[in-house]
Amino acid sequence: MRKMNVAIVGATGAVGTQMIKMLENSSLPLGTVKFLASKRSAGKQLSFKGETQTIEELVPDSFDQIDLALFSAGGGISAKFAPEAVKRGAVVVDNTSHFRMDPTVPLVVPEVNPEALREHHGIIANPNCSTIQMMVALEPIRQALGLKRVIVSTYQAVSGAGNLAIEELAQQTRDFAAEKPLDEWEASILPASGDKKHYPLAFNALPQIDVFAEGGYTNEEWKMINETKKIMGDDTIRVSATCVRIPVMSGHSESVYIETEKTATVAEIQELIANAPGAVLEDDPSQQIYPQALNSVGKKETFVGRIRKDPDEETGVHLWVVSDNLLKGAAWNSVQIAETMYEMNLFE
Ligand code: NAP
Ligand code: 3JM
């Protein structure tokens, strides 16, 4: 195929910055690469493959001659501009939640359901960061043993909430070090920028990610529940989630409890993970080996450990699942989707 012209929407963001790095190292045959953001960033410069590039303001005509558009600038921007990109002939990989549950839009983790890409109508949705890493860990178990039930609690890094949230935590941490009283710490973004109240994250744990919705669950929790069923193509899997933000910069951790159809030993489950694409087994309690958020940063894989049987439920298994939320959770999964589509000849 001829070279592919790519646009990155939200190129200055926490996700967009990592998209640029993933694209720099991608196997895709790149033509021009456009860096799009808001008017605030237009004219600023960044480096791509050692060359200086200028950021442009996002407008509908930004997508003329573009083959692939990677979106991560918020759901409202995707709602408005993804159809404009498709109209102009681009394939869109969208990182926001806007299109994820649309039945005409594939929701893809390449290790799990690459064949869904064949059904696309111009837009492919990248799942939520917390869903993606859980899918990498659970799909090999589902294939071998069947999956009846998932109960997950997350320990999510602040970088999943964007650059302003990262800066807010950094400032609160400096305030703590300077012994500033708690009531003088600034909190205007977290737990959810669109919500009424804001709380400090430094030295804290906030059991709210995104806003509250039906049944006392937050939107982030509903994303994990609904996306899991769609990606695994099975509405009968019982899923529940509790999503918690903790003061870690990058790397989401998850305590995942599952019930399978068939029983297996810990050693058998460890082998399934060790042989699974995109997963790395880090599980040796005798040597205190287990996945850690800090060690996951900058890596594309999902790390799995602490695998153990539930003491009371024969088919119950506990796992600890860690991945870089900005890479497999967002930028890498998106670029991997594009690379997979290229390999499947889905760019005409
Ligand atoms: P961020 O650090 O706040 O960056 C936001 C980006 O969007 C910036 O590049 C910003 O450009 C751009 N933007 C904002 N308003 C715009 C406008 N009116 N027109 C054009 N560009 C605009 O946020 P982030 O963490 O990178 O996340 C961005 C989005 O990605 C989120 O809103 C979310 O939907 C999605 N996301 C998905 C996952 C996932 O799990 N798959 C994870 C994190 C985020 P300026 O610098 O010019 O303001
Ligand atoms: C991760 O539209 C927005 O305000 C973005 C909110 C957001 C999302 C989302 O819902 O797209 C922030 C961080 C996500 C996500 O991946 O679901």
Image (tube, rainbow, N blue to C red):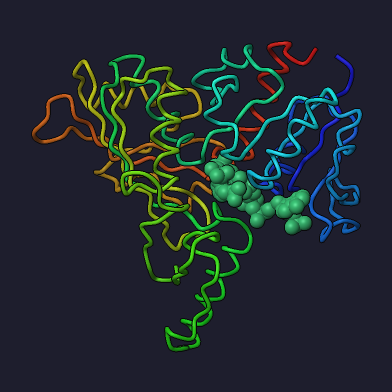
**Quarter holding the N terminus?**
top right
In this image, 33 relative to 151: left or right? right
Foreground of the two, 28 or 228:
228
In the rendered image of this protein, does residue 142 appear above or below residue 65?
A: above
Q: How many marks?
A: 0
In the rendered image of this protein, does residue 229 appear above or below residue 79?
A: above
In this image, 20 relative to 222: left or right? right
Image quadrant where residue 244 sits: bottom left
Res. 299 visible in picture: no
Foreground of the two, 20 or 125:
125
In this image, 51 relative to 208: left or right? right
In the rendered image of this protein, does residue 215 appear above or below residue 280?
A: below
- Residue at the spot 52% in from the left edge and 35% down from the top edge: 301
- Image spot of residue 90 (x, y percent): 80, 25
In this image, 54 relative to 195: left or right? right
- Image spot of residue 149 (x, y percent): 26, 27
- Residue at the spot 48% in from the left edge and 42% down from the top edge: 323
Res. 46 visible in picture: yes
- Image spot of residue 117 (x, y percent): 62, 16
- Residue at the spot 80% in from the left edge and 31% down from the top edge: 85
- Image spot of residue 170 (x, y percent): 56, 71
Foreground of the two, 56 or 326:
56
In the image as oriented, which residue stretches furthest toward the front?
214
- Residue at the spot 55% in from the left edge and 55% down from the top edge: 161
Foreground of the two, 83 or 233:
83
In the rendered image of this protein, does residue 325 appear above or below residue 244?
A: above
**Quarter holding the C terminus?**
top right
Image quadrant where residue 81 sits: top right
